[in-house]
Amino acid sequence: MRIWNQIRASLGFLGLAAVTFGLSGPALARESKPALWEISDKDTNIYLFGTIHLLPPNTNWRSAKLDKATQDAGTLVVETIIDEKNPAAFAAEYARLGVRAGLPPITSRVSANKQAALRAVITKSGIPEAALNNMETWAAAFALLQVQFKELGVSGNDGVENTLKQAFTAAGKPIQQLETNSEQLGFFDTLPEAAQRELLEGAVEDPAAAKQQFNAMFASWMSGDVKSIAQTFNAEFTNSPELKAALLQRRNANWSGWVERRMQQPGTVFMAVGSGHLAGDDSVVELLKRRGYRVKRVQ
C-alpha cells in the first residue's frame, strides 16, 4: 500500500508537507532540474512549478532559471496556507470534520492481516485507542502517520513551499492559496469509507518500503523527468478511482480553471503545487493545453 506517499507528495497540509528522509550522498549531489513551465501573453506571466513537499535536509533544488522566475514573480500561489500564528483554528476544523461518535472500532477498519501492525502503531503513537475509535478513518490515518514520520526522521523545515513562502514573505510579496484548509480536509472527509480504509492501511506500511518509494519519487523530481513523475507519484491511483477523482482529477480541473481566470489579469505569478498535479494525462499542464494555451517548458 503506497497511497499515503501520494498524499504526502500532493497535499501541503496537516504537517505532511516537508517530510525528510535519509537519502544517500549521491542522491543529494545530483544536478537539480525540477520541472518548471510558463504560460504568458502580452501582460500576464504564470510559472507552474512542480514541487515535492518532503525533502531531505540540505537538498539543493534551486537553479538559476528557478531563482529568476521567483524574483520576477510578484505573487506566490500555493495549494493551501496554514496560519502558523493560529494553529488552533486548523486543529478545530480537523476535529469538526474528523471526529464523530458511534464509529466502528479502529482495529476493525483494516484487514485481518493488518490488525497487528495497526495495534503496534497505535501503541507507538501514544494516542488512546478510544480516541481513534471516534475518528473518521481518514483522520485516524493522518494521526497515525506521524509515527512513521518520526521513525523516518522528519523535519518541517526543508520543504519547497516552506522555503518559497519564507522568500516571498521576506521580499514583502503576497502569498495566495488555491484551496482553504477546509476544502483540502473536505476532499478526504467525503471519500467513500473503502477509500479511507486504504489510507489507514497505508499508515501501517513498513517504513523501509516507504523510504524506497520516496527515493524513486525524489529522483524523478530532481531530474525533472515528467514521465517518471507521473508514474512514481500517481501510479497508486490506478486501482483507486475514488482517490484519483477526489485528490487528483477534481483538483487539477479546479486549478487549471484558476490559471485560465488569472490569465485575464496582468502581472507575474509563481504557482507552486505538488509535482503529481503537473504530470500525466490528467495534469494541470495537459488540461491547459487542451484549452488552447501554449505551456512552455522552462526547465
Image: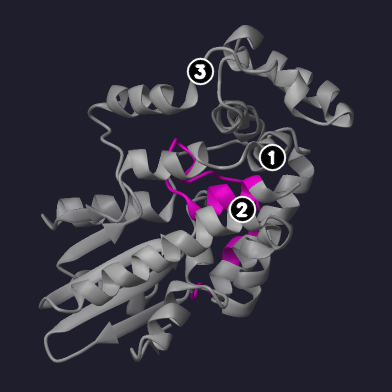
Judged left or right of residue 150, residue 277 is left
Residue 220 higher or lower than 250, as above or below? below
Q: What is the spatial separation of the Cα atoms under label 3 and label 1, in whole angstroms? A: 17 Å
Q: Which residue is mark 1?
A: 194
Residue type at mark 1 is Ala
- Crowd rating for badge 1 (residues with CA inside 10 Å; few <14, some 14–19, many 20+): some
Upstream in sequence: badge 2 or badge 1:
1
Q: Which residue is mark 3?
A: 100
Residue type at mark 2 is Glu
Secondary structure category for the residue under label 2 = helix
Q: Residue at x 31, y 66 (%)?
A: 271
Question: Which residue occupies the foreground of this view, 106 or 206?
Answer: 106
Mark identifier at residue 255: none
Residue 297 seen in this snapshot: no
Secondary structure category for the residue under label 3 = loop
Find the residue positioned furthest to the right. Answer: 113
Task: Report how many numbered discs are placed on residues in the image.
Answer: 3
Q: What is the spatial separation of the Cα atoms under label 3 and label 2, in whole angstroms? A: 22 Å
Which residues lie in the magenta part? Answer: 4-33
